[in-house]
Every structure is written in C-alpha cells, then in structure tokens.
Image (cartoon, helix red, strand yellow):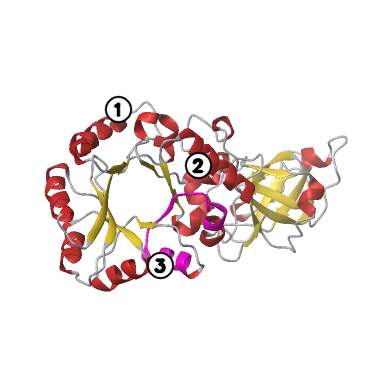
Amino acid sequence: MMDLEQLRALALHGEPCAIIDRTALHHNLKLARNTASHSKILAVIKANAYGHGIVPVAQALSDADAFGVARLKEALALRDAGIMHPIVLLEGVYSHHDLELCARLQLQPVVHSFEQLQALEQWSSGEKLAVWCKVDTGMNRLGFSGSAFATAWSRLKTLPQVKQLVAMTHLADADDRHDLRTPNQVTRFKQLTDSLSVERSVSNSAGLLTSQALHMQWVRPGLMLYGMSPFADADASALGLRPVMTLLAPLIAIRHLEVGDEVGYGGTWRAQRKSCVGIVAGGYADGYPRHAKSGTPVGVAGRYVPLIGRVSMDMIAIDLTDVVHAEHQPKIQVGDPVVLWGDSLPVEQVAMHAGTIPYELVCAISQRVAIKYL
C-alpha cells in the first residue's frame, strides 16, 4: 500500500480520484503474452476499458495485437484518438451504414446471427472486411448454434466482401476451473472448426490462465489486464497480476462518538465503545457499492479499517478508533486520502463484501471521479 505521504501528494482537493498505473497495465499484458506465448493478444477494452479510460489504456497496451470493444462508438473513439490497431467489434453490426464505417475505419465485426450475415451479403461497396464468426457452444447468448454454424460459415466463406475469417466462441464458466462445461464447450468448438484451417479464439482471461489447450491462435484477455483475478479461489497477486486502479477518496471529517451513538441512515451501526469515526467523501454516486456491508475494509495510513453504517450517495463512514489509538501510527487528519480499493486492497475483496463482482465496481466509476494516469 502507498504510504501516507505518497497518497497526500496526490492532492485530492476534496474529491474522489482513481489512480491508473500504466506500468501495471504493461506488466499484466506481458504476463498474458508470456502465458499464451504462441497466441496473438486481443486486448478487451470495452466499457471504457472496464472504467479505466479506453484511449489511455489502449495507448498503454500498444503491444497488444488487436483491441476488442463491444460497440461501434467505442471503436470510433479509438480511431479518433489515432489508434490504428485492428479493432474487433464483439457485438457486430447490423446496418449498411455501419458496415461502411467498418470498411472505412478498418474494423473487424463479429458475425453471430443470420440477420448480420444477411446484411453483410446485401452490402456491396467493393470493400472487403476481416470478419470473426461466432459459434455458440453452450452459453446461449450470442453465436450460431452448432447445427447452423456450418451453413453460416459456408455463406461467409463465399462472400467477396469477406477477406479473412476467424472462428470464435465464448466460455460460460471458465472462472470455475473445476467445472466440466469448459472442456465440453471446447470439445464442441473443435468438432465444428478443426477441419476449417482457420485462426480460432476461445480464451478469455480465465481460459488464458487455466490451460494452454485453450489458447489457440488468439486469446482475449480482459479482466486480468486490469489486475483482477477471474477466479474466486485465487487472488490477483497469487496469479502474478498487479492492480491497475486505486480508488481514493478524501477524509473530510473526524467525529468522536460516545457509547450508543448511531451512524448514518437508519442508524444501522451503533458505537459499542467510545469511537473515532471518519467521514470520507466517496459514495455510491462515485461508484462505491451501495450494498457494501459494515466491516468492508478501506485503507487508511497503511492500515485497514472497517466501513460502518450505510453507504450514502456522497459519503461513507469508517471506524478510525484503533488507528488513532495505535502506537507509532501517523497522525490521521482531515484531508488525508483513503484507499477504497486498489494498491494492497484488492477490489475483489471489496466486491465480496458488497455481494457483487469486481467487473461491476470498476465499470461503475462515475464521471465526477477524477482519473489520474501514472
């Protein structure tokens, strides 16, 4: 965890701040590259790079072979910023206008339905696209069914509009390394694609970290690039990952309570002893989870202290009693930064206390939170 003086130097100015560590991004991409050394890397930076900032993250991950985004608007932001990597549209497109944009900007749409396939067949501009064809092997979300895949692939293969094809599927439960659904999905995928002599992609972060057998020609790391573990039974540090985002918020008040005093809406926390309570300027309007329970850890002056009471829109309360009374402890003062997650406080741990997943927390960082890139 950063020491208090390092955190104070970040100058929060009374507002939450997300610190994005570019060196951690480089480290996590290198780990993905070393783990899947024979595969190309499609770095998934959809949803504003999981809340980390799509353009700065793409610039930091310039060693990736391609970028994956969900929607056209995300790809446009990258091209507007001068990023010329191949970009895969994971949800694909449906209209002739969007196909024209794909051709003009050299985007690679995923085709996962016959509606998209028909739009591509009817589009005739003289341009050619690289296309990813998605087969559904058990997730039942997007992709051609196993029985329809051969027909879809045959139609794509004969289209003059298509210059390159990649076959892909998506794993439904790779975060559980003991679940049989993943090997069953991979078996189905191989049965459908082994004879095609084409580049293929199966692995998300969990698949990439599970087995070389899942790597194939392309891997698609997302969560791991941001320093978060895709597994419930292994934390990020055990996997060699480094957290990229540290979410900070300033301490804006210190209050001294008597036994029996209550804190926050509904008075759900009551002091069992004389207590020192800190009020932190960060709440659910900033992206901190409203359902985080009392006891959720936060970092203050190199130590963990518990959240107490309900999370408010703009504030949380924390119990500073043990910190302020500890020997050789730096003096805590109004204005000090509090670590809500990140450096030495894994976001996975906060998510567990809030009954959610780390994806939701980092993606929920609101626009009013300042972002600083190191």
Question: Which of the two discs, 1 and 2, labels the residue nearer the N terminus?
Answer: 1
Magenta range is 58-79
Relative side of 159 to 81, left or right? left
Residue at 35%, 33% (x, y): give it.
214
Q: Give the amino acid at mark 2.
A: Met
Q: Is residue 353 visible?
A: no
- Read off the residue under disc 3: 73
Check the image and report above or below for 339 versus 214.
below
Q: Which mark is residue 286?
A: none
- Read off the residue under disc 2: 224
Secondary structure, mark 3, is: helix
Residue at 79%, 47% (x, y): give it.
4
Question: Which of the two discs, 1 and 3, labels the residue nearer the N terminus?
Answer: 3
Instruction: Evaluate if marks 2 and 3 touch, with contact meaning CB atoms under 8 Å apart.
Output: no
- Read off the residue under disc 1: 180
Q: Quadrant of the C terminus?
A: bottom right
The span from disc 2 to disc 3 (Cα, nearest Å) is 24 Å
Q: Give the amino acid at mark 1.
A: Leu
Q: How many marks?
A: 3
* Of the pair 354 and 180, the residue shown nearer to us: 180
Q: Residue 322: x percent and y percent?
A: 78, 37
* Of the pair 133 and 234, the residue shown nearer to us: 133
Q: Give the amino acid at mark 3.
A: Lys
Residue at 18%, 61% (x, y): give it.
160
Relative side of 256 to 208, left or right? right
Q: Residue 226: x percent and y percent?
A: 54, 46
Question: Which of the two discs, 2 and 3, labels the residue nearer the N terminus?
Answer: 3
